[in-house]
Amino acid sequence: MSDSQGPLWEVFVQKKAGQPFVHCGNLHAYDKEMALQNARDLYTRRGEGMALWVVPTAAIVASSPEDQGSFFEPSNDKVFRHPTFYPMPDVIKHM
Amino acid sequence: MENKDFEAIFENKLAKNEMVEPKDWMPDNYRKHLLRQISQHAHSEIIGMLPEGNWISRAPSLRSKLVLLAKVQDEGGHGLYLYTAAESLGTSRDEMLDALQTGRAKYSSIFNYPTLSWADIGAVGWLVDGAAIMNQVMLQRTSYGPYARAMVRICKEESFHQRQGYEVMTHMAFGTPEQKEMAQDALNRWWFPTLMMFGPPDSESPNSENAIKWRIKRETNDQLRQRFVNQTVEQVQYLGLTIPDKNLKWNESKKGYDFSEPDWAEFKNVIKGNGPCNKERLDARNKAHNEGRWVREAAAAYGKKQMEQYAAA
Amino acid sequence: MTTQEALFKYTLRLGDCSIILAQRLCEWTSKGPFLEEDLALTNIALDIFGRGKSLLEYAARIEGKGRTEDTLAFFRSDRQFTNYLICEQENGDYAKTMIRQAMVDCFDLLLYSELTKSKDETLAGIAAKSVKEITYHKRHSFSWTDRFGNGTEESRTRAQKALNELWRFTGEFFEVEEADEILIKEGVAVDVKSFQNKWETELHALFEKANLTLPETVFMQTGGRKGIHTEHLAYLLAEMQALPRMYPDAKW
C-alpha cells in the first residue's frame, strides 16, 4: 500500500447557532470521523465554533474563472430584484 | 483568451491590490515563487516545533509546560494551514514532505540552532517569533489569497507567542544570578541568527525583486531587519541584558539603530546543511515520518473500507 | 486518617495520574504519525495537564502546608507519587499509546461523571469540566482502537500486542483503600466498584468490534497507590523535575 497523508477535506465552522457555516480551511484525514475530529482540534482551539461540517474536497464542484462573465455579470443589471428599485410613498414607513 | 490577456488581468489585479485566487491564471514564475516561499514557510513551522519541543518534557513549572505545549501545537497548526495554502497551487503535501525529508526543500535556518537552556525557550519565543511575526504581519496583505488568509489566522494565533517568550525572559533576567546568566547567554547565541531570519541583504537577495513586484512581499529584507532592531533594543534594555553587538548605536539621522551585519558566511553555511542541528532536525522529522508509516497505512486501509461500505449502502 | 488527610491523598492521586499520563502524552508532540494527529494528541495532553494542575493546586490547598502544585509536581520522589502504574508506562508505538488511552479514558469518564456528584464542590467542579474533555478523548482513542483493529494486519497485530502488555495494569483502577472508604462514606469520593462492570462491558465491546481479544489469565499488577512503581517512573521524573531540582531557588 502506498503511503500518503490521506484525502483533503474542506472545513466549515458555524460560530453560533443560526449563523451560516463558513469555510475556514482544509485538512487531511483518512475517514469521516477522523476528519471531524481533526477539524475540531485544528479549527476550534480557541472557541471559534459551535458546529462543524467536513466535506471531501473531491466532492466540491466549482465554477471556473472563465465562467465569471457569463455566470455572474448578467445578474448585475437586474436591479428590479432589489427592494430599492421600488419607490415608496413617504407615508409608508414599514415595507 | 490569449495568454497576453490573462497576463493583463493578472497585472491589473496586482495593480488594484486585489488577491489572486487558486484558479486564476498566474505566471509560472509567480506560481513557482509562491510555492517555494509557502512550502518553505510551512516546513519552518514544522521543523520549528523541534527545538521548542525539546523542552516540553522539562518545562520547570506546570504553567510553563501548558503554555509551551500550546505554543508548539500552534506552530504545527500553522504549518498545516500553510501546507494547505501551498496545496492550492497544485503540489500535494506528500510531495512537499518528501522534499523536506530528503533535504531538497529549505526551511528557516534559525531552527538549525540548538536550544540549550530554558532561557532559549524565552529567546526563541521573544526574538525568533518576534522576527517571524514582523514578516507575517506584512504577509497578511500578500497577493495570493490562500496565503494571505492563512497569515491572518496565523497572526491572530501568534500574538501570544512573543509575549510568552518575553515572559520567560523576564523571569530569567530578574531571577537568580544563574538564571540571569542563562538569559544573557541565550541572547548572545540567538541575536545574530535572528537577524539572519530576514534573509540576505537586499543587495544580495536574488528573489526579492520579483517578490516585491508581485506583491508577495511588501517590504524588503533590510527594511524588516531594521524595524526589528529598532523595536527590540528597548525590550533588551528593560531586561537589563546586553545585545552582543559593539556597533549597536542610535543613528539620529535615520531615526534608527546602526548595527553589525550578521555573519553571512555562517548563514550560507547553515543553509547548505552545515548548521549545528541540520542533521538532528531532519533525522527527527524522518524518524517520526517513518515510524508513523504503519499508522497512516492502517488509517488509509480503514478509511478505504469505510468508503466502500458507504458506497455500497 | 482524618477526612482531610483522606481528601488530600485522594486528590493527590487523581492529580498524579493526570500529570504523569500527560507527561507521557506530550512526548509525542512534534513526533506524531502525521500532522493532524500530532495536534489532536497534543490537545488531549493539554486537557489532562490542565486537569492535573487544578487537582494538584487543590491538593496543596487541602494540605495547607505551603506547598503549591509545582512543589508537589517537581519536588516529590517517585515513592511519593501515587499514580496508577498504567499512566507511567512508556508510550511504545502509537497502538500502545492509543490502547492505554482507551482504557484510561473509559475509566476516567465513568469516574469523573460520578465525581460531578461529589459533596466536595471543588472536586465536583473540576469533574464537570473534565467530563466534557474526557468524552472527547474517549471518542478519539476508541476510534483509533477500531482503526487499528480493522486497519491492516500490522496495525491489528500491534494493537493486540499492546492490549496484552497493558491489560495487567488495569486492576489498579478498581482498588479501594482506606482514604477511598472514608470519603465514599462522606459522599465525596467515587466508589469505583459501582461501575467496574460497566467499564468492562464497554471495553469488551470496543475490543470485539476491533477484532482484538483480551488476554485470558492475567495477574493484575499493583503498587501505584503505595508509591511502589514500575522502573519507568523514576526516569520520567528525573527528566520532568531536572530544572527545578537543579535550581531550587529559581522562580520560573
Image: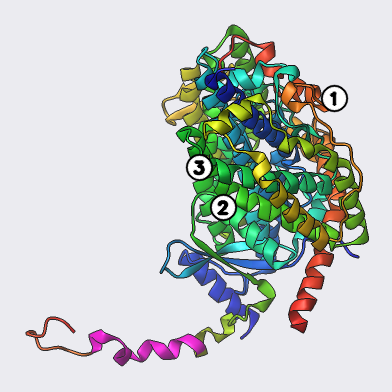
Q: Tell me, yes or no, whether the highlighted magenta stretch contains residue C248.
A: no
What SS does tag 1 mark?
loop
Q: Position of residue C149 (x, y in %)?
A: 84, 59
What SS does tag 2 mark?
loop
Query: Residue A36, which numbered label?
Result: none
Chain at numbered mark 1: C
Chain at numbered mark 3: C
Residue type highlighted by circle 2: Lys
Q: Which residue is mark 2?
A: B217
> Secondary structure of the magenta portion, mostly?
helix
- Compare residues B153 and C156 and report the one nearer the observer: C156
Query: Range of the magenta residues?
Result: A71-85
Q: Position of residue B286 (x, y in %)?
A: 85, 45
Label 2 environment density (alpha carbons within 10 Å; few <14, some 14–19, many ≥20): many
Chain at numbered mark 2: B
Q: Which residue is mark 1?
A: C231
Q: Tell me, yes or no, whether the highlighted magenta stretch contains residue A77.
A: yes
Residue type highlighted by circle 3: Lys
Q: Position of residue C176 (x, y in %)?
A: 69, 32
Q: Can you name the residue that lies furthest to the left here?
A: A91
Q: Which residue is mark 3?
A: C117
